[in-house]
Amino acid sequence: MTTVGLRERKKEKTRLAILDAALDLFLEQGYESTTVEQIAGAVEISPRTFFRYFTGKDHLVLLFHDHAEDLMLEALASRPPDEPPFTCLMQAMRAVLADLQGATPEDAERFLKLRRLLDEHPRLVGLSVARGARTEQHLAEVIAARRGVDPAQDQLTHLIVAWAMSTMRVGFECPRREGTFEEVQHRMAESIALAERSLRPGWDL
């Protein structure tokens, strides 16, 4: 048991070292100009080892999306089956917020570097949007199952999910993208509360 724990901790340490090296290189010399070989060299590993942890450079940029989606799907799975879809989606948003609030200073720095990277490279914004659309599709499948409808046919399911995801997006980006990590958390909490207050009484969403 101890051996497995040590092995997992070593893997996580290597994974974070790769991420940190990549983010620094991306911001110093540009995303397109940075190669997997350079990232691997900065951590003193082989490119082959790099690919044991990440599928490529884009995977590094989308790590927050992957993590947030995992948190939301896990939160949805734990909600009461009769809870209104929008309500349980807001609880899923709160799971992401709670994770941000529990972040280490190192995690906070990584998050802000990722935001800066997206700001400086428009192509990556498109990549981020596409990844967000995939998350919406996965959430819609879960919500449709809770509502007992076909996700391929039910527009209301997709509207509920889109509104919930807009809550997160507005929290992260509006009224401005820049700011401290604590300000990002505060804006997201405000966005969730505003969305809940705005839901018209009597709407069973």
Image (cartoon, rainbow, N blue to C red):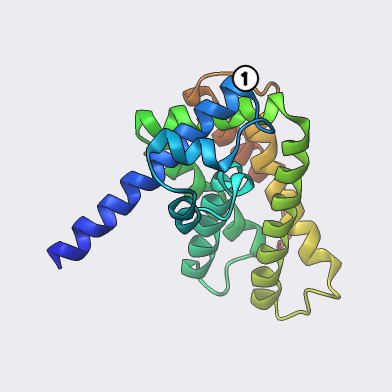
Residue 71 % position (x, y): 49, 56
The foreground one among 56 and 172 is 56
Vertically, is 158 above or below 114? below
Category of crowding for the residue at label 1, using alpha-carbon neighbours closer than 10 angstroms: few (below 14), some (14–19), many (at least 20): some
Residue 190 % position (x, y): 59, 32
Q: Is residue 36 left or right of residue 165?
A: left
Q: Residue at x 71, y 63 (%)?
A: 204
Q: Is residue 41 left or right of residue 192?
A: left
Does the image show residue 66?
A: yes
The foreground one among 204 and 187 is 187
Q: Residue at x 34, y 50 (%)?
A: 12
- Residue on which disc 1 sits: 178
Residue found at the far left of this picture: 2
Residue 25 % position (x, y): 54, 27
Q: Residue at x 44, y 30 (%)?
A: 108
The foreground one among 195 and 75 is 75
Vertically, is 133 above or below 41? below
Does the image show residue 112?
A: no
Q: Is residue 203 left or right of residue 90?
A: right
Residue 159 % position (x, y): 80, 58
Q: Quadrant of residue 115?
A: top right
